[in-house]
Amino acid sequence: MKLTLVTDVNGLAPLVGQMMRPAVALPQVDWTSEVVLVVDMGEQRTAGYAVTVTDVSRNAAGTVELRLEVRKPGRGDFVAQVITHPYAVARVPRAWLSGAAVVGIDQHGTELIRQVVSL
């Protein structure tokens, strides 16, 4: 799992083609007050993988928490043999990310990502 910070519309350009198709609908972002965090599962060799950001919050200690729904194919599942690159996009207020830790927590409470982000 990888986390990428995008601080302006130009920062999205390197991601197009790497993991995003040009037709992906991105959230409406007010770049003056918001940034985008991209949660990337990396390249997967089969279908059946997915990640979704279900909630974004900031706790009392200032840590930004991304609640994630992560899906992986189960043992014995029949899945297409195709390269996929699952990712999710979340808008976050700029004010939350002044040297803050960003933590990605899955639906089981497991911490998958921890990264300090500075603007």
Image (cartoon, rainbow, N blue to C red):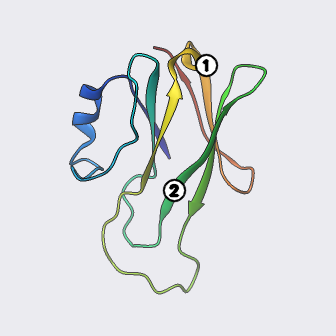
Label 2 secondary element: strand
Residue 24 percent across, percent down from the top left = 30, 52
Q: Earlier in the sequence, mark 1 or mark 2?
A: 2
Rendered view: 19 above or below 98: below
Q: Which mark is residue 48?
A: none
* Mark 2 residue type: Val
* Quadrant of the snapshot with the C terminus: top left
Tell me which residue sits at (40%, 25%) in the image. 30
Tell me which residue sits at (40%, 52%) in the image. 42
Rendered view: 9 above or below 56: above
Label 1 secondary element: strand
Spatial CA distance of label 1 from label 2 is: 23 Å
Task: Classify residue 66 by image quadrant.
Answer: top right
Q: Mark 2: few, some, or many residues within 10 Å (few <14, many ≥20)?
A: some
Rendered view: 19 above or below 12: below
Tell me which residue sits at (60%, 56%) in the image. 69
* Mark 1 residue type: Ala
Residue 91 percent across, percent down from the top left = 49, 34
Q: Which mark is residue 100?
A: 1
Name the residue carrying label 2: 51
Using residue 53 as the reference point, say whether residue 25 is left or right of it: left
Q: Mark 1: few, some, or many residues within 10 Å (few <14, many ≥20)?
A: some
Tell me which residue sits at (50%, 15%) in the image. 118
Using residue 59 as the reference point, say whether residue 14 is left or right of it: left
Using residue 29 as the reference point, say whether residue 90 is left or right of it: right
Of 74 and 51, nearer the camera is 51
Residue 31 percent across, percent down from the top left = 38, 22
